[in-house]
């Protein structure tokens, strides 16, 4: 057990393993002990991949000893959301319907992590098929927030956020369709990135809404977040939507002591935002202004329509993507005399309530007679939302908004009111609809000591600016002893 593990960042672990200050197997043992203790209490993991982790850690140590090169994440414990495929271990998407399914291949993201020397310690809990904002829609039970266990960690990547916040691993990956990395990051006091659409390969990520899905990393600070993105981003021949972009060195966080021009969309700081959240965002903005960054008010006139548009498009795509879970191809099968009865039973037993609600809504908005009124209309408004951003980025470098209208709420608070739950995504979903990158960074605490997240939104492939802005904010908060 390594005593200082608790405080080590991913960069420090990799440097320590390379310089033989630590052995990867000791780091791994510490991480696994925590996964089995804290991780179990929080219900953060669906599977702990102990055997794989040990094997990977031993291999890294052997390479270090023989002087062979090791990657940028040498010996760094990493957790993956359980909708990211990893050969030989179940991928459940926190759904009963995938019982017994073990993928025969690695997601590109998982593969790149392994090639970079990472040690994969487990598959994390989540909302079923990534549908939810609280990690309460899991067949494996809810996951708790390590800051206060009666609170939700956010969702759908709740288990990944809890893993990093509880310091079981310095890095974890989640997935985003409408805010599922940024909102849990804000609820757990972490940094979380939703990359530009096409920034990280989706190969091996179980599809929810393919036109928005992206894998995204979570970390305790900006530098680790940049490292986590840098390691897995880039074109992949297995995903035709991944983009061949010349990625810069994202770890170059300070060399350009850049003064930003930030836009403050007035639609995002009005009604419905908790007072405490608003206050913390305003204080952070004031601090940025004092350091010479410029802040101007702007408008994103179509953003109030984002939630409605998001839930039409996401559910439409989900209803199509989830048609493949039929009792024949993957996982669970409920036996019956007739084929159709087998489909019916499997799907009615296998999917949870929220997933069924989405499939029904999605099927409805795609059906003849309603397609034009709902789905087609939503696609038109989606384009207007994208253009609002395009125009904003002609005037400013980045936008600042709260990540979520509230801080972490109590378990059970919103389960019986899906619409209230959907409103958690009000500030995050616009970036997914527009395909642009956004980052949530901690910016302060409420009077009850709960973390508040601030969101930076950037133009396509503006990740380098997002990291620099997040780093600038982090430095200010550290100086002011807020973090
Ligand atoms: N909370 C949103 C939803 O339920 C976002 C989910 C996500 O980003 N995967 O759809």
Image (spheres, grey):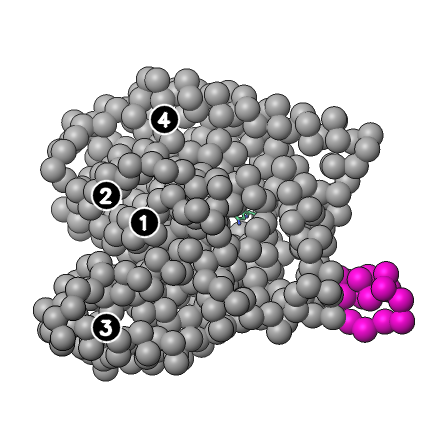
Q: Are marks 2 and 1 in contact (CB under 8 Å)?
A: yes
* CA separation in Å, label 4 and label 1: 26 Å
Mark 4 Cβ inside 8 Å of ligand 1: no
Crowdedness of circle 3 by 10 Å Cα count: few (<14), some, many (20+)?
A: many
Residue 245 horizontal/vertical position (percent): 33, 36
| Sequence-first tag of 1 and 3 | 3
Residue toward you, 109 or 293: 109
| Sequence-first tag of 2 and 3 | 3
Residue 229 is marked as: 1
Residue 414 horizontal/vertical position (percent): 60, 53
* CA separation in Å, label 2 and label 3: 24 Å
| Sequence-first tag of 2 and 1 | 1
For numbered disc 4, what is the local secondary structure? strand
- Name above or below for residue 166 compared with residue 265: below
Q: Residue at x 14, y 46 (%)?
A: 479
Q: Which residues are magenta?
A: 334-348
Query: In the image, is residue 187 part of the stretch drawn in magenta?
Result: no
Crowdedness of circle 4 by 10 Å Cα count: few (<14), some, many (20+)?
A: many
Q: Which residue is mark 4?
A: 264
Q: Which residue is mark 2?
A: 250
Residue 394 is marked as: none
- Name above or below for residue 121 compared with residue 233: below
Q: Quadrant of the N terminus?
A: bottom left
Crowdedness of circle 2 by 10 Å Cα count: few (<14), some, many (20+)?
A: many
* CA separation in Å, label 4 and label 2: 25 Å
Query: In the image, is residue 338 part of the stretch drawn in magenta?
Result: yes
Q: Which residue is mark 3?
A: 60
Left or right: residue 168 versus residue 482 is right
Q: Is residue 294 visible?
A: yes
| Sequence-first tag of 4 and 1 | 1
* CA separation in Å, label 1 and label 3: 21 Å
């Amino acid at each position: 057990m390594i005593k200082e593990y608790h405080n080590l960042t991913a960069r420090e672990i990799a440097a320590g393993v390379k310089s033989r200050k630590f052995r990867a197997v000791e780091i791994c043992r510490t991480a696994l002990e925590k996964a089995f203790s804290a991780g179990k209490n929080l219900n953060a993991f669906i599977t702990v991949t102990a055997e794989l982790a040990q094997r990977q850690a031993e291999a890294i140590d052997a390479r270090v000893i023989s002087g062979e090169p090791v990657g940028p994440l040498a010996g760094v414990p990493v957790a993956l959301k359980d909708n990211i495929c990893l050969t030989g271990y179940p991928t459940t998407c926190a759904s009963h319907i995938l019982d017994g399914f073990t993928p025969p291949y690695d997601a590109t993201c998982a593969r790149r992590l392994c090639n970079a020397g990472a040690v994969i310690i487990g598959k994390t809990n989540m909302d079923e098929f990534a549908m939810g904002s609280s990690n309460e829609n899991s067949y494996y039970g809810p996951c708790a927030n390590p800051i206060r266990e009666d609170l939700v960690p956010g969702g759908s990547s709740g288990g990944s956020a809890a893993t990093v916040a509880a310091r079981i691993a310095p890095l974890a990956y989640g997935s985003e369709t409408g805010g599922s990395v940024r909102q849990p990051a804000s609820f757990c006091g972490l940094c979380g990135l939703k990359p530009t659409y096409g920034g990280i390969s989706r190969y091996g990520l179980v599809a929810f809404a393919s036109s928005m899905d992206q894998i995204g990393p979570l970390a305790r600070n900006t530098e680790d977040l940049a490292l986590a993105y840098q390691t897995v981003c880039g074109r992949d021949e297995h995903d035709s939507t991944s983009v061949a972009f010349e990625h810069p060195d994202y770890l170059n966080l300070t060399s350009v002591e850049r003064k930003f021009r930030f836009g403050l969309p007035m639609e995002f700081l009005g009604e419905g935002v908790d007072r405490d959240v608003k206050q913390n965002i305003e204080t952070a903005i004031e601090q940025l202004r004092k350091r010479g960054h410029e802040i101007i008010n702007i408008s994103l006139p179509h953003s109030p329509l984002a939630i409605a548009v998001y839930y039409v498009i996401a559910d439409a795509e989900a209803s199509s993507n989830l048609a493949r879970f039929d009792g024949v191809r993957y996982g669970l099968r409920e036996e019956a005399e007739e084929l159709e009865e087998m489909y019916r039973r499997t799907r009615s037993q296998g999917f949870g309530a929220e997933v069924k609600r989405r499939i029904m809504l999605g099927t409805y908005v795609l059906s003849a007679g309603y397609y034009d009124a709902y789905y087609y209309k939503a696609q038109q408004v989606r384009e207007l939302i994208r253009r609002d951003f395009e125009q904003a980025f002609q005037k400013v470098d980045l936008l600042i908004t709260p990540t979520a209208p509230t801080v972490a709420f109590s378990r059970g608070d919103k389960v019986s009111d899906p619409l209230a739950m959907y409103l958690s995504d009000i500030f995050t979903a616009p970036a997914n609809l527009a395909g642009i990158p956004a980052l949530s960074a901690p910016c302060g605490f409420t009077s009850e000591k709960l973390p508040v997240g601030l969101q930076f939104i950037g133009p396509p492939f503006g990740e380098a600016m997002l990291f620099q802005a997040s780093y600038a904010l982090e430095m200010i908060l550290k100086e002011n002893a807020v973090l």
